[in-house]
Amino acid sequence: MTSPGVLVLAATPIGRVGDAPPRLAEELAGADVIAAEDTRRFRRLASDLGVEITARVVSYFEGNETGRTPQLLEALEAGQRVVLVTDAGMPSVSDPGYRLVVAAVAADVRVTAVPGPSAVLTALAVSGLPVDRFCFEGFLPRKAGERSRRLAELAAEPRTMVFFESPHRTEAALLAMAQAWGDDRPGAVCRELTKTYEEVRRGPLAELASWAADGVRGEVTIVISGASEASTSQLTDNASLRAAVDALVEDGQSRKDAIAAVARTTGLPKREVYQVVHSGEDDED
């Protein structure tokens, strides 16, 4: 009976080729199958590393991940060594790979990794914000209403938060964060990490949003300080509750959904948030 193969999740440089761990070249040279998010970019990387590729190279990206996973699992079960690489950083962290890992684990196939560059940890380390506790939130939803709902759910999160964002949505994301969490919440926008034009902008959210209004280029990672006890408690005063609900309504949510989102964020009963919001409307009348 053939012994199962090995799935290797191989981290690739997020900027400089020289940051590639030595073991990356070893794994690429010894692979039976290489699954690459972008095969052309992968071959350039292999050339830069001076690695001669003898493995079968297949594409593995968001558009074909579901269909390609069973094929790669078949190779693993046949005893082959499959190396998975994405365009930059660690596979499966906001990149293709999670489905294949789940399938391999379910089939009792060994899964290992080549540790290496990570935009999440690099941005966190240089942000100047607390690093003792943090969470990775990936990409925010593109639609304004869904984005506001997600941010409302995170308003009381005490840990430092790390996000990925596209350059053309960075300003909108920062403005939405400022609206949801306050203009003064500290943050850092890390652009083009480890590359020639690396830039880290630090400051309160309102200031960062103003900076981003001029346009942002390159790969972007955003790091935001977690909520303090004081900022969390402020969310529970009546004026702040009304403002939070109004902000979500302005972004397209129904008032019912906005009240439910604010209730989840603050930990208050929906009935109480409803009464506060509608009592405010009565006061205005």
Image (cartoon, helix red, strand yellow):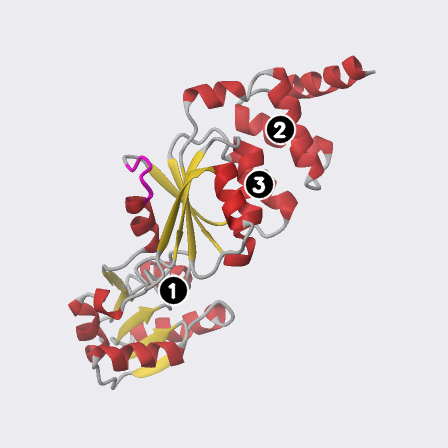
Give percent across and percent down for residue 113. 24, 61
Q: Does the magenta run of residues contain 153?
A: no
Disc 3 or 1, which lies upstream in sequence? 1
Amino acid type at mark 2: Ala
Camera-near label (3 vs 1) is 3
Residue 247 appears anywhere in the view: yes
Amino acid type at mark 1: Leu
Q: Left or right? Give the position of 179 relative to 208.
A: right
Question: Residue at position x 37%, y 34% from top?
Answer: 159
Quadrant of the rendered image containing residue 25: bottom left
Q: Nearer the viewer, residue 226 or 90?
A: 226
Question: Residue at position x 27%, y 83% from top?
Answer: 55
Q: Does the magenta run of residues contain 129?
A: yes
Alpha carbons under labels 3 and 1: distance apart: 34 Å
Question: Residue at position x 32%, y 80% from top?
Answer: 44
Q: Quadrant of the C terminus?
A: top right
Give percent across and percent down for residue 192. 38, 59
- Secondary structure under the numbered disc 2 in the rendered image: helix
Q: Which residue is mark 2?
A: 244
Q: Is residue 276 above or below residue 17?
A: above
- Magenta region: 127-131
- Secondary structure under the numbered disc 3 in the rendered image: helix
Alpha carbons under labels 1 and 2: distance apart: 40 Å
Camera-near label (1 vs 2) is 2
Disc 1 or 2, which lies upstream in sequence? 1
Q: Is residue 252 above or below residue 94?
A: above
Give percent across and percent down for residue 200. 37, 49
- Secondary structure under the numbered disc 1 in the rendered image: helix
Q: Which residue is mark 3?
A: 176
Amino acid type at mark 3: Ala
Disc 3 or 2, which lies upstream in sequence? 3
Q: Left or right? Give the position of 63 relative to 254.
A: left
